[in-house]
Amino acid sequence: MPDASLSRLVHDLASPDPVVRDESAYAALSALVRTGALTPGDRASLATAMLERLRHDRIEARAFAPLVLAALVRAGDGEQAWVPAVTTWYVGERDQRGHDPLLGWLHAVAHGADFFGACGAAGLGRPADLLDALARRLVAPTPCVWRDQEDDRVAHALALVLARSDLDEVTSVAWLEHVRRLFAAGSPGSVPPEATNTMHTLRSLHLALGEQPLDSGIPVTVPHADLVRVEIAALLHEVTPWAWRPRRGRA
């Protein structure tokens, strides 16, 4: 593919026009990565551009970069250094809008989660680091209650990381310490948005781990699913003790 054409797609991926950015540029870039149509040099240049894009001053530009990086990871081109770079952006991203009437899909929370889920599925990065990044995003103070299935996307990413064969029991639940501290800091009054987002995400994850999580439609096995579900249930019971109680001897 000519460099000029690739550069144009990268440029259009930052467009405020959702048709140009999402339906055209992103669709084309993801297809090029998925089908192996890019040279190694093109893929390296694309990754560099996406990592730089995470520091862009406009949310519509930042938010689509991790999706392209996720596609590269799934194609086998991921690098360990991408994980801390995306983590810095993800945990610190303040604009958590899902769909905007003018800008279309932004979805930084979901798109970032997709990157970490792709890393989990591809064996890229330490599982502890991936889980920690997702957990820190969950509990970070925010004025925004997620409304466009961000909680489900984060839960799915967590499930893919938890399916890693190199994940031990301790690491599989250590990330929940972030949640434990968040819930312990609660006080009478309105529920903080980050607490609501966390509750919704944990409920989605608990459900997924009790069924069969999928990676691109293919079932995956989560080795410590029962242990994680027990820990999640205990945490959720702390915030809704009046609604239900855990069954003895069951997750």
Image (cartoon, grey):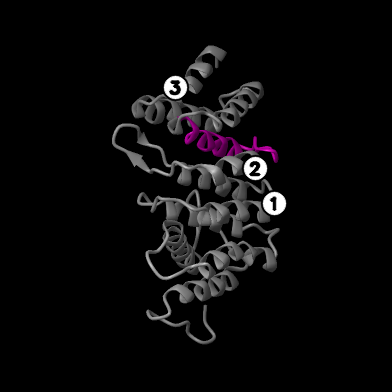
Q: Residues within 10 Å of mark 2 (few under 14, many from 20)?
A: some
Kind of residue at disc 2 = Val
Q: What's the residue at 47%, 82% (across, down)?
A: 246
Q: In the rendered structure, are the residues bearing label 2 and label 1 in contact, judged by CB atoms less than 8 Å apart?
A: yes
- Bounds of the magenta span? 61-83
Q: Whole-Å distance between the Cαs marked 1 and 3?
A: 33 Å
Tag 3: amino acid? Asp
Residue type at the position of mark 1: Arg
Nearest the eye: 247 or 186:
186
Q: Tell me if mark 3 has few (under 14), some (14-19) or many (20+) residues whose alpha carbon lies within 10 angstroms of its own.
A: many
Quarter that holds the N terminus: top right
Which residue is most to the bottom? 248
According to the picture, the residue beneath numbered tag 3 turns out to be 12
Which element is circle 1 on? loop
Q: Is residue 157 something one can see in this rendering?
A: yes
Compared across the picture, whether 44 is left or right of 111 comes to right
Mark 1 vs 3: CB contact within 8 A? no
Q: Quadrant of residue 19?
A: top left
Task: Name the residue carrying label 2.
Answer: 83
The residue to which callout 1 is attached is: 126
